[in-house]
Structure formats: structure tokens, C-alpha cells
Image (cartoon, helix red, strand yellow):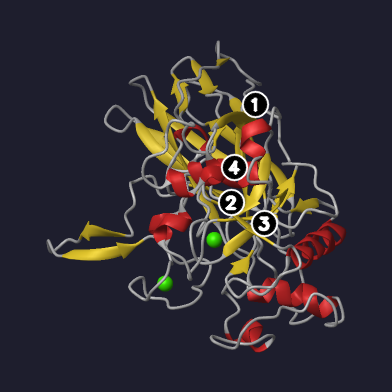
Amino acid sequence: MRFLRLAFFLLLSAAACDSELPIEPVEEYTGDSWVVFYQDSIGVLKQVIAFEPTFIGRQSVVEIPVAYLDTFTLELAVSCDDSVFKVSPAAFTFTKSKKTTTLKVTFQPELPDSQAVAHLHFQVSSDLLSADTTMEVVAEDSLRLEGLGQNYYLDLEMVFIQGGPFSMGSGTAEDTADVHYENPDELYSHQVVLSDFFIGRFEVTNQQYYEFWVEQGDSANRPDYSTVFGTWPQDALEKPNHPVVGVSWEDAMAFCRWLSLRTSQRYTLPTEAQWEYVAVGAEEGRKYPWLTEEPQVAADTLDGGQEEPVYRVNIQGVIDGYQYTAPVDRFPAGVSRFGTFNMAGNVWEWCLDWYDPEYYRYTTETDDPKGPSGSADWLYRVVRGGSWLESLKEARCANRGALDPRNREYNVGFRVVRLP
Ligand SMILES: [Ca+2]
Ligand SMILES: [Ca+2]
């Protein structure tokens, strides 16, 4: 699995019953997602499978290799007790020459933001054995909230982020070469430990924000930006999948409060630490979300041997295909380790924290830091990731930006986090 997407779990629940032969469940863990059957036993390996998060109307599929380790013929039937899950094939036979197969488990939820549990039943139909073992399947749907404005579904897809330690900031006081001298606020890297959370796979879109704005009665939290590439609310209708811009920190927080009320979940803005943790890939310490060094453009070898450029990020200029904002699901080659899009570039993203350029120098906060405790005298909140208006350097994961929380800028948007 390329990404740690934990919206889907497979848990062990193996039990033998109605058995005439000495069939005992086998419990092993090899780090792979295998279900293994032996001649004299049936085992479902204990496993947690990273799974593509899904939401209403779309399917997600996980493939599970299945093996039979002995040489006798074994016929198995598999069934599922929850209609949002489907498993195929429903029956298969192991023989001497065919001892492996692949199960496909499909999840297609019917309710928004729901969790579903199913049991897969493996039934042995061979004369040799008689057993029934079950596997418990748990899947969590991403948010899809029915809005009022356009009767539209928000499709606000959230990615599970497993917490842990990481090094926040870039380098040390001695590390003053290259770009660092221009960015003293990100020096003094320090260890931070984060709890689990969910983060939006994409920047919040025009259409998502539009639903909120309409429900507010369109007087408050109105996006405000130059007409250089569009106006509100026309952009919401004409470019629904572009990131919303021209929203202040206050607007973004109002969106989060509305979302929390509508869903009874805890949505907020990412802390600066949460944002950077996702961007750098936790302990991987990436300079850019896409791992490799500074490739604004990478070459991808096609079948015919031709080289075609692959753009990883929307920054200043049109070489990446966009003069202004790009739809939030563009640049799949630039996703983070966790599968989040456009953390670098496209639009700057508001973070929860107050901005203090000296904060990294004095902070002793290591567990789920929320930045300096601000007051009315504080001027700025943190923004991260650069935008279509800035150079690649500004899109570095460790780069810190700052902005008056009341400001509405045409290159600043946000993404949300959900706390478990
Ligand atoms: Ca661009
Ligand atoms: Ca961004």
C-alpha cells in the first residue's frame, strides 16, 4: 500500500465451528495482507490494511491474497453479511496447481460519514474439512454532507493520519546556508509528538464553501478577492472544484464551526505542527511533499520511450498549466506520503496557530503543540505551503508564512482537520 490510509481496517475474528476434523484457527502476522488456509486448519491472518477512503457513490476496493498451503483440493465459499460490502469471487477452489487466489472486497457506503462493520464468512465445502471462519471488516466513510444551497454533496474527503514523532522546522542554528538565512523563523528544528487526526485530502473548494456561505445567509463570511481571475459567487458555480480563496482566518474558522455543528464532529484548522507533519511525511522529513528534491517538473518515461513532463505543483507561472488556481485534485504526482493533494502550492493554507517568528527558539511544547498563546496584540496567524503566486522555494514543507487573520487574499485558502 502506497499510502497510510486507515479508513478501512481488517480485523481478526477467526473462529472454527461445527468442525468434525481438528480445525483450529491459525493466527499469524507477517506484515502482509494474506489469508492462509492449511489442510488441517483455517486461519485469517491478523492485519490492518491501509485502504482507499471512500464516500457515497464511489467504490473502494481492497485486494486480499488468499493461499492454501497444502496439496489437497479445497473448495471455499465466501459470503458477506453487510450489503455495503461485496466480496468476489464468492467461491473458489484450490488444487495442486492453483494454490492462491485474490479476494476483492468492495465497500460502497449508503450513509454519509458512517462506519460499517461486516463479517466475511469462509465456508469449506470440501469433503476433507468442515469449518466456518469469519473475518470482521470495518470501514469508515468520509464525510458527504447534503448541502442546502445547490443540494450538493460536500464530498469532503478526510484522510486518517496516524500520529507519532517528527522533527519540526529545518536544520539548526549552524545550518545557515542556502535558503535558511532567509527563513530564520523555521530554524531550530525540534521534536514534536502528535496524536492521531484526520485531514482533508484536498483544499476546501469553492463549492464546499458556497454551501456554508449560503446557509449563513450570504451576508457574513463572504469571500473577497480581486477580479483578476474571477469573482464570488460566480466562481463557486463556474469553478466549483477550485480552492476557495479570499477567505480570512475568521471565515475559515466559521466554516469549521458550521461543519462541526452539521456533523457533530470536531472540525477545525490544522495546527502548524499537524500541517507540517503531513507535508513532510512524518519522520521522512521531506523537503517537498513529493519526496524528491525540488523537482518543479519531472520527466516520466512513457511506453514509446518519449519523455513527458509531469508537474507536481502549481506555483508561479504557467509552465505547470495554471496561471492562477488549479482544481484541488490536480497534480497527483505531487501528493504527500499520506495522499493529500496540493499541500505545496495552489493556495496558501490557514493554520490554527498564532505566528511568532521566534516561537521555535523558545518553545518547550512537544505534545500536540498549538503554537504561542496569542493575545489581542498579536498580528498574524500562520499560513503554509505557498501558492500559485509564489516561487517553488515558498512551497517548501518547513516554510512558514504569516498573515493578518482578518485579511482576505486571492492566493490564500485552507483545508480542515477532524479530531477523533
Ligand atoms: Ca502556476
Ligand atoms: Ca496548498
Please tell me how many numbered marks the rendered image carries: 4
Q: Residues within 10 Å of mark 2 (few under 14, many from 20)?
A: many
Instruction: Please tell me the numbered disc located at residue 194.
Output: none
Q: CA distance from mark 4 to mark 2?
A: 23 Å
Q: Which residue is drawn at the image coordinates 42% and 59% (left, top)?
A: 332
Point 82% across, 64% down: residue:
254
Q: Quadrant of the N terminus?
A: top left
Q: CA distance from mark 4 to mark 3?
A: 18 Å
The residue indicated by pointer 2 is 53
Q: Quadrant of residue 242?
A: bottom right
Helix, strand or loop for disc 3? loop
Identify the mark nearer the N-term, 4 or 1: 1
Q: Earlier in the sequence, mark 1 or mark 3?
A: 1
Residue at which label 1 appears:
13
The amino acid type, in three-letter code, at marker 4 is Ser
Residue that label 3 marks: 109
User: Circle 2 sits in a helix, a strand or a loop, which is it?
Assistant: loop
- The image shows residue 21, relative to residue 259, as above or below, that is above
The image position of residue 238, as x and y in percent, is 59, 87
